[in-house]
Amino acid sequence: MIELGLVDGTAEFTYFDITNYDPYAPDFNPEDPAQLPIELDSAPTNVGKYLVIVYLPYDYSKFSFDRTFTIEPATPKLSISAVPDKLSGGKIELTVSGAPDGSAISVSCSDSGAVITEENGKFYAELPNSTKDYIFTATSTATDNFTSGAAECTVEVTNKSDPIIINPPKPI
């Protein structure tokens, strides 16, 4: 077993954004600050390529090593729901959640005849009284840290016809 001689203390981390740093690129200019690593105040949370240097206390000096890592865009947990989701025609409210901040949201329907409106961030659809399933799709656009997303829900419409009177009462 090898004794490393680590002493009590806390590891120190220094982070650099190296998204635009490529010293092997033909047009690399070490005088251009935009092409150099950028030291960060804290651990990164945004999409990009990073370098971390870890300093560990070792005897009376510090031991260090570095690693590069990449943060990829996350997939949003988009969802859509309808109230009510079973009816005999009429107006429904569609609720979309899980879209990242700054993302544009849109809602479409498998039936182009369904009219979808948006009022104050809420979506509504008017559905006819005919037996049919409608599939509503919510989409969100990509942002700096998220990919685009999509989710679906189904609304079941059952035709509710007027009652048929077989033997109408005789007028008095």
Image: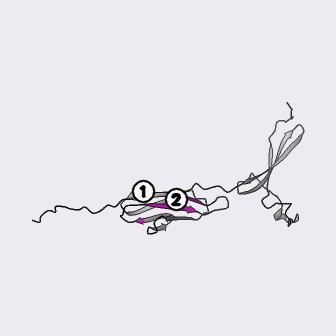
- State which region is magenta: 126-152
| Residue ranking furthest to the top | 1
Dot 2: what SS?
strand
Residue drawn at the location 81% of the way across and 38% of the way down: 9
Where does the image place residue 52, in percent across and percent down from the top left? 80, 50
- Residue under label 2, please give it: 96
Residue 161 place in picture, x, y as percent: 29, 62
Left or right: residue 20 compared with residue 158: right
Q: Which image quadrant is residue 150 in?
A: bottom right
Crowding near the residue tagged with mark 2, few <14, some 14–19, many ≥20 C-alpha atoms within 10 Å:
many
Image quadrant in which the C terminus is located = bottom left
Q: Which residue is mark 1?
A: 85
According to the image, what is the colour scheme of the structure?
A: one colour
Name the amino acid type tagged 2.
Answer: Val
Observer-nearest of 170 and 101? 170
* Amino acid type at mark 1: Asp
Observer-nearest residue: 154 or 5?
154
Residue 136 on image: x %, y %: 48, 61
